[in-house]
Image (spheres, rainbow, N blue to C red):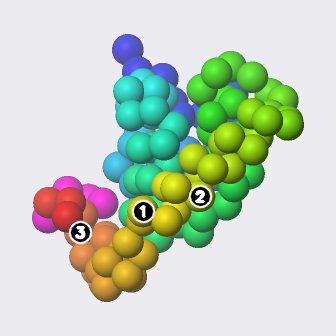
Amino acid sequence: MSSPVSSIPNLGPASEAAFRLAGITTAEEIRALGPDDAYRRLLEIGSRPHFIGYYVLVMGLQGRPWNDCKGAEKAALRKRFDAICAGFNRSAAKQRSDLEQALQFFGVIERS
């Protein structure tokens, strides 16, 4: 049985919709990917990088409130976030047309 993305603490309908656009429809898929790869998938579809969104995901996967991240732990997560964003090729995502993204979403063409 699969659980909705919104079953992960701190994630709601907006997160569920964003992950759906990235081809991720269940909480189990996010757990299997881990927070870094799941967040990278959001960036690949053109989501704007946002540190709070990243650490909310990390905290949720740990079953912790979103605002539980502080001090050295938050600084370490910031480094991970920056590394994810730095390694992301934004120009490739921008080159895909809206039509191509829609066709990929509906499974008409393979994800690149």
Instruction: Name the residue at the top extreme.
Output: 1
Q: Real-space Cα distance between discs 2 and 3?
A: 30 Å
Residue 65 versus residue 103: which sits nearer the camera?
Answer: 65
Residue 98 versus residue 69: which sits nearer the camera?
Answer: 69
Question: Of callouts 1 and 3, which one flags the residue occurring earlier in the amino acid sequence?
Answer: 1
Residue 87 - label:
1
Magenta-colored stretch includes residue 31: no
Q: Please indicate whether residue 92 sits to the left or right of residue 22 in the image.
A: left
Residue 53 visible at all: no
Instruction: Read off the residue under disc 2.
Output: 82
Which part of the image, by quadrant, shows the C terminus? Answer: bottom left
Question: Of callouts 2 and 3, which one flags the residue occurring earlier in the amino acid sequence?
Answer: 2
72 is higher (above) or lower (below) than 85: above
- The residue under the point 42% across, 65% down is 88
| CB atoms of marks 2 and 3 within 8 Å | no
Instruction: Read off the residue under disc 3.
Output: 103
Overall secondary structure of the magenta stretch?
loop
Residue stretch rendered in magenta on the structure: 105-109
Q: Determine the image quadrant of residue 49.
A: bottom right
Residue 66 is situated, as x and y percent measured from the top left of the image, at 78, 35
Instruction: Name the residue at the left extreme.
Output: 109
**Crowding at mark 2 (Cα within 10 Å: few <14, some 14-19, many 20+):** some
- The residue under the point 31% across, 85% down is 95
Q: Secondary structure at mark 2?
A: helix
Q: Determine the image quadrant of residue 56.
A: top right
Q: Please indicate whether residue 14 sits to the left or right of residue 107 in the image.
A: right
Q: Real-space Cα distance between discs 1 and 2?
A: 9 Å
What's the residue type where badge 1 is placed?
Gly
Residue 32 is situated, as x and y percent measured from the top left of the image, at 38, 27
Q: Secondary structure at mark 1?
A: loop
Q: Real-space Cα distance between discs 1 and 3?
A: 26 Å
